[in-house]
Amino acid sequence: MNKLNDLDSKTWLKFQKSWFIHNPPPRRKGVLVHPAKFPETMAQEFIEFFTKRGQTVLDPMAGTGSALVASLRCGRNSYGIELNPKYAEIARQIVTEERQLLGDSIANLKSEIVNGDASLAATYQFPAIDYVLTSPPYWDMLHAKGAETQKKRRSAAELDVFYSDDPNDVGNLHDYEEFVAKLVAIYSGLKPLLREKAYLTIIVKNIKKGGKIYPLAWDLGRELGKVYTLKDEKIWMQDNQRLAPFGLGSAWVSNTFHHYCLQFRNG
Ligand SMILES: C[S@@+](CC[C@H](N)C(=O)[O-])C[C@H]1O[C@@H](n2cnc3c(N)ncnc32)[C@H](O)[C@@H]1O
């Protein structure tokens, strides 16, 4: 009996590879305004591995709601918390559209976005959560003046360059240690909501700033591994990005086209 998911052995085995390539499909118009999201198609693969139909998924930093859309598509209930009221509203709209598209088949599923602070998650009225799929702001990098993609976004007036000015937005913490501690506190605070043996997948990058690496993925693995069991990593690679000539002819500066999908388990 398969206790974890509804997958056949072939699909299960395929997911067990420690890396995958996923090039996000073009984003729909409404969500372009948000500076960083993970693709729904990829979220769905994680949700289908770590839950069964009818179970419940939480994204405590839901952005424009990709995890909720993916949950609907594979018959899971879902909850999201998003601090920025603008994104929370976009997420609600997108989820409503998806529900209309999917029709009666998903009428009994819940999908709910709370416009709130992830550090208060345990005080919101959520049912027991079977799986957390989430990705935090990559520190304060969206504030970095040189960030290439942000430069392009700045020239497109209606697109956001960073998430918000809210002091509770973890992307506005400029001290790295404080940022890591806050993230760890937020994810640890989800524990009372989680079922025993529930998995959490946190998608992060190590961060390059001022000519050195801040190993966010590794720091999070070490620190949050004291609260949950750090089970594994899975590397998400993109191979459709244009290479930039950083450091050409003078220094080693990589083009970083991979993210860590850190897998934790509650117990
Ligand atoms: C990387 S984005 C998440 C994108 C999301 N996975 C998606 O696919 O749309 C991180 C999000 O965290 C939100 N955020 C930052 N601090 C937060 C907090 N304390 N509570 C809830 N959301 C927060 C930001 O507004 C941003 O939308």
Image (cartoon, helix red, strand yellow):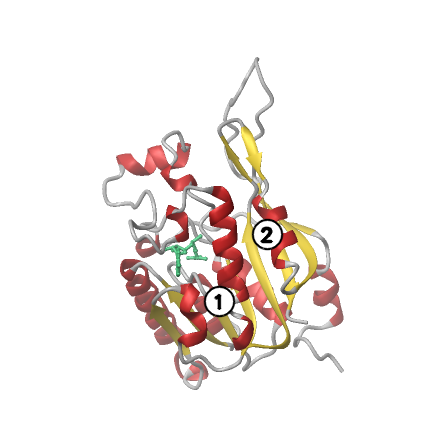
Instruction: Report the residue marked by disc 2.
Output: 220
Q: Which mark is residue 226?
A: none
Residue 84 position (above or below residue 177): below
Q: Residue at x 43, y 40 (%)?
A: 141
Q: Residue at x 54, y 76 (%)?
A: 192
Instruction: Report the residue marked by disc 1.
Output: 70
Amino acid at circle 2:
Leu
Splitting the image into four quadrants, where does ligand 1 fall?
bottom left
Residue 178 position (above or below residue 141): below
User: Which structural element holds mark 2?
Assistant: helix
Sequence-first tag of 2 and 1? 1
Decide which of 94, 170 is in the foreground and name it. Answer: 170
Residue 223 position (above or below residue 209): below
From the top left corner, tell me how far across and down residue 106 is, in percent: 44, 81
Please identify the quadrant where the C terminus is shown. bottom right
From the top left corner, tell me how far across and down residue 263 is, in percent: 64, 60
The quadrant holding residue 11 is bottom right
Q: Residue furthest bottom?
A: 108
Characterize the local packing of mark 1: few (<14), some (14-19) or many (20 or more) Cα atoms within 10 angstroms.
many
Please identify the quadrant where the N terminus is shown. bottom right
Q: Residue at x 61, y 58 (%)?
A: 224
Decide which of 35, 94 is in the foreground and name it. Answer: 35
- In the rendered structure, the answer to whether residue 69 lies left or right of residue 91 reads right
The quadrant holding residue 6 is bottom right
User: Which structural element holds mark 1?
Assistant: helix
The mark tally for this picture is 2
- In the rendered structure, the answer to whether residue 16 lies left or right of residue 158 reads right
